[in-house]
Image (cartoon, rainbow, N blue to C red):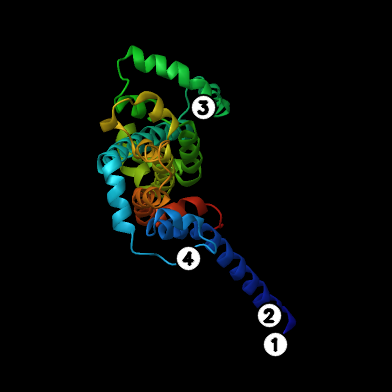
Amino acid sequence: MPVGEKQNIISRIIIYILLAAGAFASAYPFYWMLVISTRTRDAVYQIPPAIVPGPELIANFSHALERIIFFRALWNSFIVSGTTTVSVLFFCSLAGFAFAKFEFPGKKLLFVLVLGTLLVPQQLSVLPNYILMAKLSWIDSYKAIIVPSMVSAFGIFWMRQYIMSSIHTELLEASRIDGSGYFNTYWRIVLPIIVPALATLGIFTFLNTWNDFFWPLVVLKNNENFTIQIALQQLFSRNDSIDYGMIMSATFFATLPLLIVFALFSRWFISGLTSGAVKS
């Protein structure tokens, strides 16, 4: 066997070993969560730790259902995350299309201001946003969570960069010659081409909104309006010992929608991340 080919085989083996180790390190916390969710509350303290699922998953989850309105909170999170994701995809792709393919006064300054908002810590906007939501009487409503998140500066930047590299100006000029309006061009030509970028941005937005804890905790007051993250926090009791089996079972079922969303859109997600990485 030639030396070069032997070195290539060794390099591939090393890469596969590193990838397998990385995959194991990433998946093990989810597996451990599943194992603890199927055992009693004392299983988390066992030495050596439990590595095989037990029979207590349904019992632990039943205890969680007695403590919180789980499915209502799950539905609330789905409504908030889904609505926010759809609005972000629409407005950010529309703004990205304008910044990428149109010339208008103040375009560069406006885009710099949009990017500048990424440098502002999120904590600084909590008080102004809360006062604004209170003035609008939106406290303890979904609007207080959805409306401030309907547009993302990162989303505008992401869509602008993707549209600049994937949408050719000649295509837009041909559409304009055929009598297509700006929005019709965006809807019928631009959107089908940028599906991978939309899927990537959509997954990031859905995950971030689903996992958001602080802002919903600030603006939501009624138990029936709680998102899943706030509901899960209620499982931690100060009076009793922490039942990790119950908490992990509820967390496991709360994580399933995220895994389903990623599984459904992973192909476009990977395509969006790798677009432009290989020269054609």
Secondary structure, mark 3, is: helix
Cα distance, mark 1 to mark 3? 58 Å
> Which labelled disc corresponds to residue 16?
none
What residue is pinned by disc 4? 51
User: Does label 1 or label 4 sit earlier along the sequence?
Assistant: 1
Q: Vertical placement of 55 versus 126: above or below?
A: below
Q: Amino acid at mark 2?
A: Glu
Cα distance, mark 1 to mark 2? 7 Å
What residue is pinned by disc 2? 5
Secondary structure, mark 1, is: loop
Circles 1 and 2 in contact, beta carbons < 8 Å: yes
Q: Which quadrant of the figure has residue 18?
A: bottom right
User: Does label 4 or label 2 sit earlier along the sequence?
Assistant: 2
Q: Vertical placement of 133 versus 251: above or below?
A: above
Between residues 261 and 99, which one lies in front from this camera angle?
A: 261
Identified at 30% across, 15% down, the residue is: 137
